[in-house]
Amino acid sequence: MTDIHDHGLWTHDHHFLGEGHQRAESRARLAAGVTAVFMAVEITAGFVFGSMALLADGVHMATHVGALGLAAGAYWLARRNSANARFTFGSGKFGDLAAFASAIVLGVVALGVAFESVERLLTPSTVDFRNALFIASFGLLVNVACAFILGGSRDHAHDDAQNRNPSHDHGRAHAHGNDDHNMRAAYVHVLADAATSVLAICALAGGLIWGLRWLDPAVGLIGAGVIGSWSYGLVRDSGLVLLDAAADPALESEIRALVESEMGARIADLHLWRLGPGHHGLIVSLVSSDDINAEAVKHKLRERHPDLSHVTIEVAICSDCVGA
């Protein structure tokens, strides 16, 4: 006769925010403010000097102001709702939602810049290359400053994650599980802006020195392609998190090997998904012919993989199960 006992164990701390959350929030706000100031200058200069590359860069920068503001807002909402019981698995995905929205904005901007650049290729217009070049060069400095602001937050978050678990070799293999998609989206926006600034400078310099007016819109097309590529990557990665896709195949394989080889149980069902930067949820159903302690299994898993922040273990004791 089959004897089955179920043991369900849940963690109760649903605070699944990334390391250095408040630091990232303050840096996102600072970067948004710096970008907003120069955005107004660059858009105005683009209209005054008639440069499509400069105007595209300014409009693109305007979207970054919104994206950086969205990133800062997501950090604030996640922090404010970290203890809200309505969010069953915590508020860690606010950042992924913001990243997805930012990626969509990036894609729309890429399409708009590409359309306007094609129109300028077909219908060339007069450009004040000298003054536009000065503004674009200053804009690049602003982009670099914002990249350092946001990049510092990314570095600190990575160091915090490493310090939290410095003794395990698997940490590097699963480093992508600690990625803050919200900060990544903000960082990509700034990098995209820096890239378009560099391209605009090259185009304006070519027009000023050699009179190559077609470079201005041509560079706009190249920039649109780069931005579109980054947008696709962000949509894919943040979208998978929002859909609770399998978070980490390598980590899942390690968990299966640990349970089945070291504990002698058979995994009947396993669900591994991301809860927030550096946090994973895990639900495992085990079948065993021996009376395995679910708490011991959970302790062993979390000792080996500290990023398993929310763990549920269900054990079915089946005395006559074959291959258990």
Image (cartoon, helix red, strand yellow):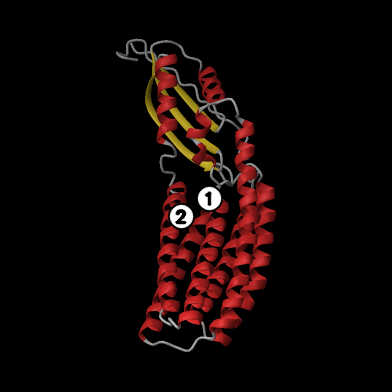
Q: Which mark is residue 181?
A: 1
* Quarter-of-image position of residue 72: bottom right
Whole-percent x, y for residue 223 in the image: 44, 68
User: Can you give x and y, in whole percent of width and height, for residue 142 in the image?
Assistant: 64, 66
Q: Residues within 10 Å of mark 2 (few under 14, many from 20)?
A: many
- Direction front: furthest residue: 209
Residue displayed at 66% across by 49% down: 79
Q: Taking 134 as reference, is 84 above or below it?
A: above
Q: Which is nearer the N-term, disc 1 or disc 2? A: 1
**Which residue is label 2 attached to?**
234
- Is 181 drawn above or below residue 317 in the view shown? below
Contact between labelled residues 2 and 1, with CB atoms less than 8 Å apart? yes
Q: Position of residue 149 (x, y in %)?
A: 66, 55
Q: Which picture quadrant has residue 187?
A: bottom right
Helix, strand or loop at label 2? It is helix
Which residue is more in the foreground, 269 or 222?
Answer: 222
State whether residue 40 appears in this view. Answer: yes
Of the pair 113 and 296, the residue shown nearer to us: 113
| Residue 295 position (above or below residue 118) | above
Tag 1: amino acid: His
Residue 314: give its label: none
